[in-house]
């Protein structure tokens, strides 16, 4: 299978910079797979699992928001948060889920509801990725 360059960056630094055969990531419209020779493309990312295939081996991560761009065959993910499955603290993610549920139950306005739902979605994404290593 042909490969292409992929760079994954967060506000906390670089998470990946190398060649891969594919990347599958969650966009606002659903999952999208990028392969070598993909047309130029830009899309917003949602919270979801990201799968990067390098040398035939798949590696998964929790990707929370950001942007995916493919320009002249090079793919870039600028993620708000990106954690490889082996970096996720499962207990901490479960605690974050419970805190998010508590905040949702105690929410007084739509802004608090939206923030609590985002916390819950982020925690669930991290839990799902960590449990399916």
Image (cartoon, grey):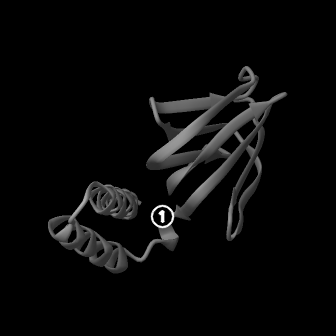
- Give 97 or 88, whichever is nearer the viewer: 97
Does the rendering let one see residue 85? Answer: yes
Quarter of the rendering containing residue 127: bottom left
Quarter of the rendering containing residue 6: top right
Does the rendering let one see residue 60? Answer: no
- Give 52 or 54, whichever is nearer the viewer: 52
Locate residue 33 relative to residue 91 in the image: left or right.
right
> Residue at coordinates 65% horizontally, 40% vertically from top-left?
68
103 in relation to 4, above or below: below
> Residue at coordinates 61% horizontally, 54% vertically from top-left?
79
Q: Quadrant of the C terminus?
A: bottom left
Q: Quadrant of the N terminus?
A: top right
- Give 84 or 114, whichever is nearer the viewer: 114
Quarter of the rendering containing residue 33: top right
Locate residue 76 relative to residue 82 in the image: left or right.
right
Locate residue 63 relative to residue 109 in the image: left or right.
right
Residue 46 image position (x, y, % from top left) = 47, 44
Q: Residue furthest top?
A: 39
Q: Circle 1: is it few (<14), some (14-19), or many (20+) Cα within 10 Å?
A: many
Locate residue 108 relative to residue 117 in the image: left or right.
left
Residue 113 image position (x, y, % from top left) = 26, 58
> Residue at coordinates 40% horizontally, 58% vertically from top-left?
129
**What residue would you read off at disc 1?**
85
50 in relation to 112, above or below: above
123 in relation to 45, above or below: below
> Residue at coordinates 68% horizontally, 71% vertically from top-left?
12
Q: Residue furthest left?
A: 105
């Amino acid at each position: 299978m042909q490969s292409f360059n992929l760079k994954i960056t967060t506000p906390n630094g670089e998470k990946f910079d190398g060649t891969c055969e594919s990347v599958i990531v969650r966009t606002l419209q659903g999952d999208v797979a990028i392969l070598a020779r993909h047309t130029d493309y830009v899309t917003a990312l949602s919270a979801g699992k990201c799968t990067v295939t390098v040398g035939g081996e798949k590696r998964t991560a929790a990707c929370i928001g950001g942007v995916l761009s493919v320009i002249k065959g090079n793919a870039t993910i600028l993620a708000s948060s990106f954690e490889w499955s082996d970096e996720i603290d499962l207990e901490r993610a479960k605690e974050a889920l419970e805190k998010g549920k508590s905040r949702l139950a105690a929410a007084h306005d739509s802004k608090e509801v939206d923030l609590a739902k985002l916390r819950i979605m982020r925690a669930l994404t991290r839990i799902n990725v960590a449990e399916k290593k």
